[in-house]
Amino acid sequence: MALVDRLAYGANRAARVGWYTAHYFLARRIAPADGERRATREEGLALRAELRRAMADLFAAELADIESGIYRAPPPFELPPHELVARSLRFFADIREVDARRRGRVNDEPFRAGLRPDLPRYYLQNFHYQTDGWLSPQSAALYDTQVETLFTGMADAMRRRALPPLRRALAGRLRSAKLLDIACGTGRFLAEVKRNWPRLAVTGLDLSGDYLAEARRLLAPWSRVDLVEANAEAMPLPDAAFDAVTAIFLFHELPRAVRVRVAAEIARVLKPGGTFVLVDSLQKGDRPAFDGLIEAFPRSFHEPYYADYARTDLAALFGEAGLRLRETELAFMSKVTSWQREP
């Protein structure tokens, strides 16, 4: 990669991080955190230094993979400026409603409103205290800005760390293989996949029709895309139908028993020898400096299953389903693991 390309990559990443970091601090000014122990100045400085180090490590790993041709350099933003600003304005307009739920510990509006009683009870919640839970076009339109703000512009970069293990797993078969992304949401990860490998056949599965509608718009430029509204606990898909399956930021939002069922379904739809790539939160002990953040997260946001996930033995969970661990990478606030279905 030429020096000018490296400089462009650095400038693009800095622009994105700067944009969403500004969102983060402005959001905190509008809706300050309460009820949490305030860190000392020394603790705050040490934590910020560790966060910067972890961010730099992720960007270094990504740049190395871009230079190796594993995937393409990403653009700084996925939207034209006018749409980026419009989404930011909607995000800030919604903050006070989110904060009112957080202060009142109101977290089950979808259930109490009777929205989609056919869906699992654990799903009918205001995760992150977000408006309408997962069940409205407004929620779907806000979600990506909310998540990028939470991670100060690093969410897509963490998602992209699933691309290298996928590339290794599907080497030489990117035109013939089939990929399933469960809980695909608004299609952010599948857009990264199709931008790099447009001929790879992909299926996205999600419980929210509104989020799938957003994904359908995002993925419209590409062919060989199928979107399925269904539950990952019982996927309406054939056995051994996919060469690879991905799950991005799903498992920490599932109750323990549901994780077991979803793991079994992943193994069922994978071909023997197929690859499963999980991108999810760091767990306790992965980066000891961040253990305090992991403990505070479910208290600051409505994440009822997160604390249990942070202590889950992933090798036991997926091993019981017949999946064997192949690779592990820490990527900022996430952990990327690659698993192979036993032949």
Image (cartoon, rainbow, N blue to C red):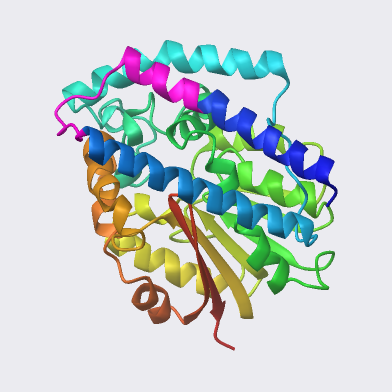
Residue 138, placed above or below residue 50: above
Q: Nearer the viewer, residue 174 or 207?
A: 174
Query: Viewer-proximal residue, 8 or 146?
Result: 8
Q: Is residue 249 magenta?
A: no
In the image, is residue 48 above or below residue 320?
Answer: above
* Residue segment shown in magenta: 21-40
User: Depth check: 289 or 220 in front?
Assistant: 289
Residue 262 drawn at (x, y percent): 43, 64
x and y percentages locating residue 335 in the rendered image: 46, 59
Magenta stretch contains residue 26? yes
Residue drawn at x 63%, y 28% as measured from the top left: 15
**What residue appears at the point 59 percent right and 46 percent down from the top-left corner?**
157
Q: Position of residue 91 (x, y in %)?
A: 48, 18
> Does 77 sit left or right of 323 as displayed?
right
* Residue 194 horizontal/vertical position (percent): 76, 49
Q: Residue at x 19, y 22 (%)?
A: 103
Q: Quadrant of residue 200?
A: bottom right
Screen quadrant of the C terminus = bottom right
Residue located at (65% from left, 53% from top): 62
**Residue 29 in sight in this render:** yes
Nearer to me, 190 or 261: 190
Location of residue 177 by image quarter: bottom right
- In this rendering, the answer to whether 241 lies above or below 182 is below
